[in-house]
Amino acid sequence: MTDITLVRGDITEQAVDAVVNAANSSLLGGGGVDGAIHRRGGPQILAACRELRSSQYGRGLPAGQAVATTAGRLPARWVIHTVGPVHSEQEDRSALLASCHRESLRRADELGAETVAFPAISTGVYRWPLADAARIALTTVRQTQTRVIEVRFVLFDDPAYTVFRDTLDALGPA
Ligand code: AR6
């Protein structure tokens, strides 16, 4: 069974097999977690993303999907890039946010990654309300069949950590 752990910290410092990046469709970098991963991981990651763009994702990676690259100089083996949905008041995009988590775990299984760190996808620039994002992220990971042993959610600040903690507690024992 997969163990879900929560830590408050910086995802670029996690010594895990795979780190999940909250990327955008271009795969060519941005701010937030994406910026931090490319900055700390170095140019090898961007080179691998450019390669994926030209070989398979000429139109960009659609929201809800995930792809893997080297982790460059990060203390991880791989980065799994996934594209979260931008939050919308008009349209329910929860299925896409769930898909980011499922597809990232599917990529992790393909790689043989046993420890995977996730940020709180879509809760920054993409404005997803934290409590709702936490519920979707945690329930999706719980419901996904995977060989990953530890899924570690890495929350950047105290409010995000507290919301994830309370949400996980409210879900009760797995
Ligand atoms: N470690 C862990 N969490 C972090 C870190 C870090 N180093 N830095 C920020 N966070 P965001 P999104 C938290 O905006 O909403 C980018 O420009 C942050 O506090 O990184 O999915 C991409 O290129 C927030 O809770 O991702 C896309 O264009 C969470 O990570 C767009 O932003 C996600 O915030 C994606 O937006």
Image: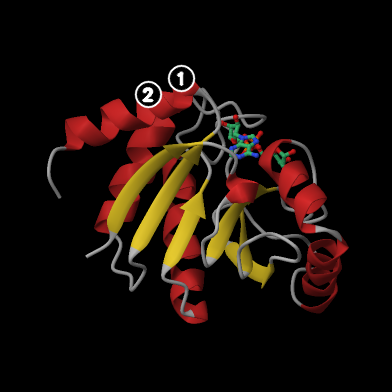
Q: Is mark 2 within 8 Å of ligand 1?
A: no
Q: Amino acid at mark 1?
A: Pro
Quarter placement of the N terminus: bottom left
Q: Are marks 2 and 1 in contact (CB under 8 Å)?
A: yes
Give whichever of 5, 25 is nearer the camera: 5
Q: Residue at x 61, y 49 (%)?
A: 13
Question: Label 1 belongs to which residue?
Answer: 159
Residue 92 in the image: above or below residue 66: above
Q: Residues within 10 Å of mark 1 (few under 14, many from 20)?
A: few
Regarding ligand 1, which quadrant of the image does it lie in? top right
Residue 15 place in picture, x, y as percent: 55, 59
Give whichever of 120, 162 is nearer the camera: 162
Q: Please indicate whether residue 5 sits to the left or right of residue 43 in the image.
A: left
Give whichever of 27, 156 is nearer the camera: 156
Question: Label 2 belongs to which residue?
Answer: 162
Residue 129 place in picture, x, y as percent: 48, 24
Residue pushed farthest left? Answer: 173
Give whichever of 67, 41 is nearer the camera: 41
Q: Residue at x 75, y 63 (%)?
A: 73
Q: Please indicate whether residue 104 sits to the left or right of residue 141 in the image.
A: right
Q: Residues within 10 Å of mark 2 (few under 14, many from 20)?
A: some
Q: Please indicate whether residue 155 sits to the left or right of residue 146 in the image.
A: right
Q: Secondary structure at mark 1?
A: helix
Q: Amino acid at mark 2?
A: Thr
Residue 77 place in picture, x, y as percent: 61, 70
Residue pushed farthest top? Answer: 159
Q: Residue at x 46, y 79 (%)?
A: 112
Residue 83 visible (yes or no):
no
Q: Secondary structure at mark 2?
A: helix
Q: Marks 2/1: CA distance? A: 5 Å
